[in-house]
Image (spheres, rainbow, N blue to C red):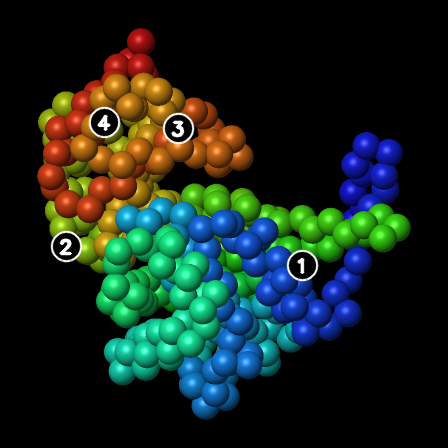
Amino acid sequence: MVLYYQDKKLSEQQFKSEAEFENIIVENSKLFFGDSSIFIETKKKIDSKFLGGTIPDGFLIDLSDIDNPEFYIVEVELANHDFYKHIFPQITKFFSFFKNPQSVSELVEKIFNIINKDSSYKKRLKSLIKSQEIYKFLKDLIESSHNILLIIDGDKDELPEIMETYTDTWGSMVTLMLIKKFKYKDEIIYSVQPDFNDIQYGDAESTTLKRSNKVFYLTEEEKLNQTSQEAKAAYLKIKSELLKLNDEIIFNPQRYYLSVSFIRNIAFYKFRRKKIRLIIKLPIEEANKIISNHKIIPLSASVQKFYNGSSCAIDIHNSDNLEEIIDAFKILIEKQST
């Protein structure tokens, strides 16, 4: 692959080794993951017996949304590695680890000790979480946020079908990031897809990783089982009220979200462990006039393009103040009716 920038021709450079790739992630972690993130390198800090006998390449705490932080086990892999002999067993061990409460508790202790002994980590985390107590913050975060970030340098034919077949693990817990290196003379440029700020919206479908011909969808019930009882109740209440307004509204489970359609798609639900993220096809300026009791999240131009039009996101944790969500849907329905 070749990139052209102004009068420069940049040629793709293969990473010489996995160690080189890992070092680049460590050295550029703030660039790749944002200023509100903390990347903890693990190779020199975690015993080889930890995490089921395998050591991940890092732990990532994403605090870009301080009310809804996310935790990731990070694994960096070269695409030329054998999938079933190397990548598959490595990631599978992380699934087993997350499902073991004792192991998760040990991880909380391990990360707390790492941060407590490293003044730079500790200072950075305190600046982001403010008055929250570090141990309690880490415990709440790691017990509720079970994500695996797989960073790879090229297409891997096995990944799409694996993610679509094992929807409760690979499909829901693994997030993909594709990073490539390009060079012009002594200048190095990295391409990252998707951008980490957009990673919770764009999904694997927005990367260049090839899709399989098979399609596996979770049902509405299976998607609801991924979230809390409070968020589930909120979804069902909104659905009931919308169907009273117009029984032609369709709730349609897709690979990575559940779409709400009236003539065409007007909104998309994404189900997380403790909340629902609702992407509504309203410009954020309009949404701000209606929504005052829920957090409204602006979306980048690339994410709005993914959802085919002006849109923004709203986090829903429970059934409080759902009237304003219904009002937003009423405007969307009216727009489609005219």
Judge left or right: residue 244 versus residue 216.
left
What secondary structure is marked by label 2?
A: helix
Residue type highlighted by circle 4: Ile
* Nearest to N terminus: mark 2 or mark 3: 2
Which residue corresponds to mark 2?
Answer: 229
Residue type highlighted by circle 1: Gly
Q: Is residue 284 above or below residue 170?
A: above
Cα distance in 3D space between marks 1 and 3: 30 Å
> Of residues 129 and 210, which is closer to you in this image?
129
Q: Residue at x 48, y 87 (%)?
A: 47
Q: Nearer the viewer, mark 1 or mark 4?
A: 4
Q: Residue at x 31, y 33 (%)?
A: 296
Is residue 156 among what the camera can see? no
Residue 311 badge: 3
Which residue corresponds to mark 4?
Answer: 291
Judge left or right: residue 181 versus residue 205.
right
**Where in the figure is residue 13, as x and y percent of width and height?**
79, 58
**Where in the figure is residue 155, as x and y percent of width and height?**
65, 58
Residue type highlighted by circle 3: Ser
Cα distance in 3D space between marks 4 and 2: 23 Å
Q: Residue at x 27, y 41 (%)?
A: 315
Which residue corresponds to mark 1?
Answer: 154
- Decide: few, some or many residues near mark 2? Use Cα within 10 Å; few <14, some 14-19, many ≥20: some
- Decide: few, some or many residues near mark 1? Use Cα within 10 Å; few <14, some 14-19, many ≥20: some
What secondary structure is marked by label 4?
A: loop
